[in-house]
Amino acid sequence: MQNMSSKENFFIGVALSNSSNYDSSICVLDRTKKIILLDKFYYAQDIDYFFESSPYIKNSAVAFSVPYDNKMLDGKWRIHSKNYKALFDYFKVNKDDWTNRISKRCFETIKKLSEKNINVIRCDVNQLRSSYGICSHYLSRTSIDCKNLQISLKIKYGFNQLPDNMLPASSLEAIIVAMFVFDYIGGAETSVMYEIDNIPVLGRKGFS
């Protein structure tokens, strides 16, 4: 249940992709947890423009998902080692920073929002899916996975506005991120998993 004494009127979830080659999405919830905006973007400039011009920014709380950086993954050993390779300054093979696991895309946008005293947090979509109990046994972002996720959001979490036709994966993830920031402001129990440029990446505790 949302803490109605909070000052936030809108709860904005941004599911970021790691580049303009893939779509990012923004979802805005109101205080009744109703979707009032769901949109898709490709370029960081468009995301910047949304936050510069949208009327929903005032008295809002915003959560950005953490995009994973997958550039330079052109060999099987790179793909596997990137997940667990210890990082050191003297790691000479680190061509073009390929060992970096996290993309800093839209960092300037996030920084500007924080400087405007807007409540901004980061999160991990996979961790949220697990904590909300909407994981599936299907390969992530495949058609059957997205269908399962969309049905779960409608039935389990009451997003009855969602259409019968399939939404993009990024839009479904943006709904999850917006739902998380809604619950975070409402007092849901969270923990800091790590920080990116002094902004905490929060995880939701519990399993629903």
Image (cartoon, rainbow, N blue to C red):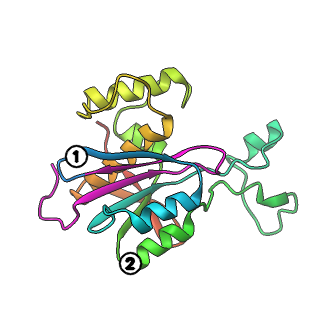
Q: Secondary structure at mark 2?
A: loop
The tally of labels here is: 2
The residue shown at (17%, 65%) is 6
Task: Tell me if residue 7 is in the magenta stretch.
Answer: yes
Residue projecting furthest to the left: 5
- Toward which corner of the image does residue 44 lie, by quadrant? bottom right
Amino acid marked by disc 1: Lys
**Mark 1 and mark 2: Cα distance apart in space:** 24 Å
Q: Which residue is mark 1?
A: 33
The image quadrant that residue 181 belongs to is: bottom left
Instruction: Tell me the element at label 1.
Output: loop
Q: Give, as a single range, the part of the protein colored magenta.
A: 1-29
Q: Residues within 10 Å of mark 2 (few under 14, many from 20)?
A: few
* Residue 195 drawn at (x, y percent): 50, 65
Whole-percent x, y for residue 27 in the image? 37, 48
From the image, tell me which residue sits under label 2: 116
For the point 26% across and 29% down, the residue is 156
Identified at 53% across, 51% down, the residue is 16
